[in-house]
Amino acid sequence: MALQDKYKELLDTASAQGITNLQVREQDNVLYVDGDAPTGAAKDAVWEVYGKIDPNFTAGDLVLNINATAGLAEGAQLKVTTASSNLNIRKEPTTEGEIVGKAAHGEIVTFVRKENEQWWVVKTKDGEEGYSFSTYLTPVG
Amino acid sequence: MRLNKMLAALMVFGSFAAFSCGQKDADIAADAQKVLPIEAKVDVKDGVATLTGQFKDESAKKAAEEVLAKIKGVKSVVNNATVTPPPPPPVTVVSAADELLAKGIKDATKDFPTVKAQVKDGIISLTGEIKKASLPKLMMVLNALKPKKIDNKLTVQ
């Protein structure tokens, strides 16, 4: 229960942001929080609180898995949110996969499907289709 | 010198004489047990030695038989020993979870060459350096891999 007290603000924020399927459990001094966020912004809000409680994420007592893309449907628009570089589009869902295309920073691509949480199939406006790393894709709207 | 030789000859003769008097089966078995490996079991009856026990391979089993045949008092050897089947090769258990985590981490840290990440028993250990601005992004990806725990020892710049 101590960890739930420590991360109370985070859990309150999650509820306030409309995180669904929220699951909170504590085991071996680690608090596991899972849930689906309605938007990327809602996910970011929860993570912001995490960063406030544990600025460098060093406590090792929370595994926060907020999925902002549970309701993502084919055809959804995704913005490339890399730091500044191009996003690689690959033939295989691994960083070793051959690069078949690139999407510029800030470009909008179309969501096709999820291979898994990390790798999504996307299509650029030029028709290049392949796997991209989901970290750098943010649903628009 | 001459006396010594004679004495030696006498001793050798003496020992033969002792054996030829007929050694008891139990003594033969005891003698055999002294020179045979621990896994060998010997039973002697009327000078016929029966070898049992488990040996690690055929050659060890055969060697024991040969040693036994040379023991004084052994007339013949019945080799009923067995050979232990070889143990199955050791299996390295890599949990699927760790493999999946390792793969996910490899992808997640690709853009952060100064970050070193390792996985063991579902726990991700991070060392190295990272820019403060990049840290939340990395942590979001790693948390989404559903590790058991993240042991973060990154130096934040």
Image (spheres, coloured by chain):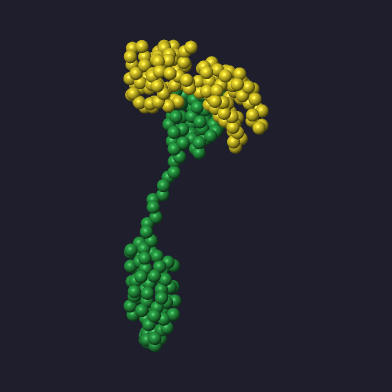
Chain colours: A yellow, B green
Left or right position of B155 against B30 = right
Where B91 sits versus A122, above or below? below
Q: Residue at 33% across / 78% down in the picture?
A: B76
Question: x, y (%) of residue A116?
Answer: 42, 27
Q: Residue at 43% across / 31% down in the picture?
A: B103
Question: x, y (%) of residue A72?
Answer: 45, 19
Where B93 sits versus B126, above or below? below
Which picture quadrant has residue B7? Answer: bottom left
Q: Could you say which is closer to the camera, residue B125 or residue A67?
A: A67
Which picture quadrant has residue B150? Answer: top right
Left or right position of B28 against B151 = left
- Which quarter of the figure is the N terminus of chain A placed in? top right
Q: How many marks?
A: 0
Question: x, y (%) of residue B19?
Answer: 39, 84
Question: x, y (%) of residue B39?
Answer: 42, 66
Q: Residue at 41% across / 11% down in the picture?
A: A107
Q: Residue at 36% across / 16% down in the picture?
A: A123
Q: Could you say which is closer to the camera, residue A54 or residue B28?
A: A54
Left or right position of B7 against A62 = left
Q: Could you say which is closer to the camera, residue B153 or residue B51?
A: B51
**Residue B114 appears anywhere in the view:** no
Where B149 sits versus B73, above or below? above
Where B61 sits versus A13, above or below? below
**Residue A1 appears anywhere in the view:** yes
